[in-house]
Structures are given as C-alpha cells and as structure tokens.
Image (spheres, helix red, strand yellow):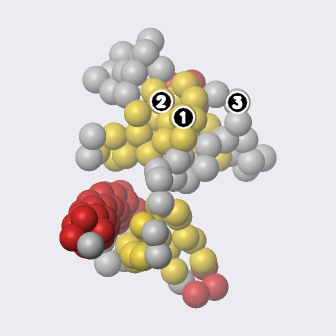
Amino acid sequence: MKEMPRIGDIVKIKTNIDSTFANGTGVVLKIRTRKDGYWIAAELLLEGQQRWFNKGEIDRVIGRPKGISRIDQTSTRTHGWYVRVYSRNKTRSRLFSDGKYKGIGPAFEAAMAFRDEAERQLLSAEAGAEEQSSQAAGAS
C-alpha cells in the first residue's frame, strides 16, 4: 500500500503473510513514520487486540467506521473518538476519551459499542413512532 492510511481507517491485511490475522480487517490506531515522513508501519485494532503491522503487510484501505471520527486537539488536550448517530430529527453524540478508557483501542471499542446501541435505540423508537402513526391513521 503506497498512500499512508489515516487514523480511524479500516484496512485489509494481505493474505500472503504468515499470521493468524491474514486476510483480516482492522482499524488504524497509530502510524509510525521515518524522519522524512515516509510511513513504515501502522498499529491496528483487530479482534480486540492491538498489534503493529509493517507497511508491506497491509493491503488497502477499505473504508471508515460509520459515525465515528477521531479527534486529536493538542491545544485543548482532547484526544478521543467522537460518535454521532442520526435518525430523522434526533441526534445522539458522545466523546470517548483515550484517557478515560485507558488507551486509544479501548476508547474505540467503547465508541463502537455506544454507536451500535444508539442506532438500535433510535431505530426502535422510530419504528414505534411509525406504528403509532399508522394505527392513528387507520382509526380515523
């Protein structure tokens, strides 16, 4: 992979490496670069484990996690994952700080769990509202 992945990218691991993670996917947590800015390795979160992979072991970027953004604002000492979930006119959002969750990986896992639960809650509330409106329309 030539272009440097960004923190938060979902990447695919090459199939020809001798590892239990071959052909797996992971989320980029950190990038290791040389002094000239050329990237040489990335720390990934795969199956709940954090592990460094050399540039040659990473196949390609396949996307970014829906609704989850990385915030690294050194001036305010804010580092974490920001989650936003939308459903019609409702929004749920929350910041998962690296400090509070004891690291970038655990904070990301907590952010994914929050996103999944918030989506489930908003979708079930939306389905309940649609059911009530269809019952009210049928009663008239």
Residue 12: mark in rendering: 2
Query: Could you say whether the residue bearing mark 2 is in a helix, strand or loop?
Result: strand
Quadrant that contains the C terminus: bottom left
For the point 57% across and 71% down, the residue is: 72
| Residue 44 appears in the picture as rendered | no
Q: Which residue is mark 1?
A: 62
Q: What residue lies at 61% left-to-right and 37% top-to-bottom?
A: 40
For residue 58, above or below residue 80: above
Q: Specify which label sits upstream in the sequence, 1 or 3.
A: 3
Q: CA distance from mark 1 to mark 2?
A: 7 Å
Give the CA distance from mark 3 to mark 2.
14 Å
Give, as a three-letter code, the residue at label 2.
Lys
Residue at x-position 37% and y-position 46% = 45
Question: Which residue lies under the disc numbered 3?
Answer: 2
Q: What x and y, as percent, mark residue 63? A: 54, 41
- Local SS, label 3: loop
Give the foreground label among 3 and 2.
2
User: Where is residue 124, by image quadrant?
Assistant: bottom left
